[in-house]
Image: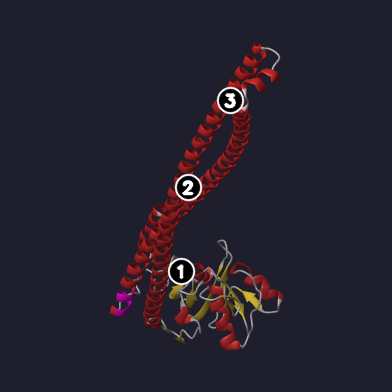
Amino acid sequence: MNALKRILSLILVLGTIFGMTILNGEITNVSARDYCVSETCKAASAAYEEATQKAEEAQAHADTLEGEIQRLQSEIVMMESKIAANKAIAEDLANQIAEQEALLAQQQSGFAEIYTEAYFDQEESELIKALKYKTFSERAEKEARDESIKAQISSSANTVKETAESLKMKKAQVEALIEDQEIQTANIAANKAKQSELKSKYEADASKYNEDAKAADAIKAEEMSKEIAKYNSIGRVVASGTNSYPYASSCPQQNWRYTGKVILAYGGAICECTGYAGYKAYERYGVTIGSWGDAKYWGISASSRGYRVDDKPEAGTVGYQTSGTWGHVVWIEAVNSDGSVNLSEYNNRYSSISGGPADFGYRVNVPAGSFRYIHFR
């Protein structure tokens, strides 16, 4: 953005040096004269600059907030993935706890069975116990084995119980972590919503300021058009009458050089030498000049259509030159006693009333040999 501003500033400086006026990023007028002279135009120009600056600042804020919104969204996605992972861990721990509790219940059942058996053994009389076991050692071995099994079951049950308690503690910790992460996610989402709301406000401000700039630009253009028309009127009087070109008040600002759009009329683009000379031929003789091409080809085009082309100037003829990239055509207003000619033309910065191209000009005492001439009668 800063680089673009520097480029536009350079263009504006160069435009001032070469008489270029730039509105809204587009060249709309070329002149050695500043056409924004009325107080209304100056106020509109200042308003345009202020609104444009505010629009850029508001858009810059919106762009910054957009980056923050994207960062917050990334945080939300990251937190949601952590929550999902921890919920999976909590679910796995719950399954492990259920398995341990089932195992503990199974062991407690076996433990109870052994104690029941031992209880009934104790209730038996010594006579029955003596009859039950063949030898004393067999009885002692049975009792020792029962005590060992009891001890093993008790130890295993305690281990299972401790494992289950440890798993429950871990599960509680994970659930607490999930709760905290969900709170963090909600806070981030709330912050994101605030940033989005603020971004929308800045974008609305930028849009409003752009509309203000557009309105001010239109006022400035209108005021400049009035000044251009008034300034062009200074050059309307020529030896044989007036500059009756119907696009006079639109020149030079509507020329393709400044708008980027070519508007053809009377054999050429408006505010160009061909469009002007073509109109003068139409005005005086009713001749419609169509696709005669660039000015340098007008002699060939006219000759091929039966018009006389020679080196003898007359008032009311078109003088043409073939030199240069496009050549040049002029309208001969008068032939002087010394054989020189007076002429009117468009798009010759050396005779232009504004000092720039695409504008009306008038020259006197031009050597007749400077042109060849197209006669329409």
Amino acid type of disc 1? Pro
The nearer-to-camera label among 1 and 2 is 2
**Helix or strand or loop: what does disc 2 sit on?**
helix
Closer to the chain start, of discs 3 and 2, is 3
User: In the rendered structure, which segment of residues is drawn in magenta?
Assistant: 40-44
**Which x, y percent locates residue 122?**
59, 26
Residue bearing mark 2: 178
76 lies above or below 267: above
Which residue corresponds to mark 3?
A: 150
Q: Which mark is residue 357?
A: 1
Q: Residues at badges 1 and 3 in contact (C-beta under 8 Å)? A: no
User: x, y percentage for residue 241?
Assistant: 45, 88
Q: Nearer the viewer, mark 3 or mark 2?
A: 3
Q: Identify the mark nearer the N-term, 1 or 2.
A: 2
Q: CA distance from mark 1 to mark 2?
A: 74 Å
Residue 140 at x, y percent in the picture: 62, 15
Query: In terms of depth relative to the viewer, which is nearer, 101 or 276?
Result: 101
Q: Among all residues in the image, which is located at the extreme left?
A: 39
State the CA–CA distance, disc 3 to disc 2.
42 Å
Q: Residue at x 37, y 75 (%)?
A: 216
Task: Residue 293: give x, y in percent of width and height.
Answer: 64, 70
For the residues labelled 1 and 2, say whether their Cβ atoms are less than 8 Å apart. Answer: no
Task: Please say if 166 is above or below 132.
Answer: below
| Classed neighbour count for the residue bearing mark 1: other residues with Cα under 10 Å, few (<14), some (14–19), many (≥20) | many
Label 2 environment density (alpha carbons within 10 Å; few <14, some 14–19, many ≥20): many
Comes first in the chain, label 1 or label 3: 3
Q: Residue at x 48, y 69 (%)?
A: 258
Element on which disc 3 rests? helix
